[in-house]
Amino acid sequence: METQCQRVKLNDGHFIPILGFGTYAPEEVPKTEALEVTKFAIEVGFRHIDSAHAYRNEEQVGQAIQSKIADGTVKREDIFCTSKLWSTSLQPELVQSALEKSLKSLQLDYVDLYLIHTPVPLKPGEEILPTDEDGKLILDSVDLRHTWEALEKCKDAGLTKSIGVSNFNHKQLEKILNKPGLKYKPVCNQVECHPYLNQSKLLEFCKSHDIVLVAYGALGAQRSSKWVNPNYPILLEDTVLCAIAEKHKQTPALVALRYQIQRGVVVLAKSYNKKRIKENIQVFDFELTPEDMETINGINRNMRYYEFLPVIDHPEYPYSEEY
């Protein structure tokens, strides 16, 4: 068994590889690149592929997986593939067809994990970001417990092995956990998490409920993203991270990824650069000391790169809570 297949057991008995490849790219990146880099990621040893309908590249990600199955690099069961239910399909009656659409794009019979991408519902329709004539997002309302019941049905139907959430705060998680007649607990909560936003309280809450925290934005954020505040400091230029990296003869990115792995956090490494993709898999080749971990904990500043400010007025906006 390859070291990079280090896996974490989920509360439903399935296993998730602790290191994943993130497939999101800003709109200006040609879709064909998603095909190339996902194939490359599988070639160098990534087995956990994180995708989503909202990334608009599931077709290319699916082609990459298929081509690596076809050439014998992997079998379907070696790959752990995640997709996510977008905000325009949170109405319970839209859930299964949204998942089926992703499966068709990915050319898969099932995904390993299906997540509610965000707790904030948007107006149903084809557009990812439905806006009115003033360019404002058109919000919607839904009881997330009903959305969750629809995900439970998808699991029972075999369309997904596991179900979870993303961008939920602890109160929104509690709402699902305390739902009368809950059939399956969320296996994970995928959130922005890195040394500047280490999510220690949310991590503690999730661990106490046997829910895995999955970290996105683990290396900070791309400046080009329209979702990101351009004035924020660049995580990978942090002097503390750089010093620890130098000490271990590793890169700051590897230190940021290793930090999460040693906290029991499943971490997504997002890069469209082949040299760095290959480098990121080396996260299993070294270890941080308890002192390193403490030092990295000390640079937390509860700083969010992805604030999703256009939906801040929605009652389900997740970041008004402390965690």
Image (cartoon, rainbow, N blue to C red):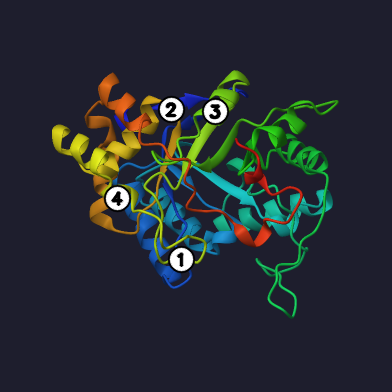
Q: Quadrant of the N terminus?
A: top left
The Cα atoms of the two marked residues, 2 and 3, are separated by 23 Å
Q: Which residue is mark 3?
A: 201
* Image-based side of 51 in relation to 67, left or right: right
**Of 128 and 58, the residue lying toward us:** 128
Q: Which dot, 1 or 3, sits closer to the camera?
A: 3
Q: Residue type at mark 1?
A: Pro
Could you tell me how far apart the alpha carbons at marks 4 and 3 are, in whole angstroms? 30 Å
Label 2: how many Cα within 10 Å (few below 14, some 14–19, many 20+):
some
Residue 314, image x, y percentages: 74, 54
Amino acid type at circle 4 is Ile
N-term-proximal mark, 1 vs 3 = 1
Task: Please give the label number shown on residue 277.
Answer: 4
The disc labelled 3 sits on which kind of residue?
Answer: Lys
Foreground label between 4 and 3:
3
In the picture shown, does residue 292 fall above or below 321?
A: above
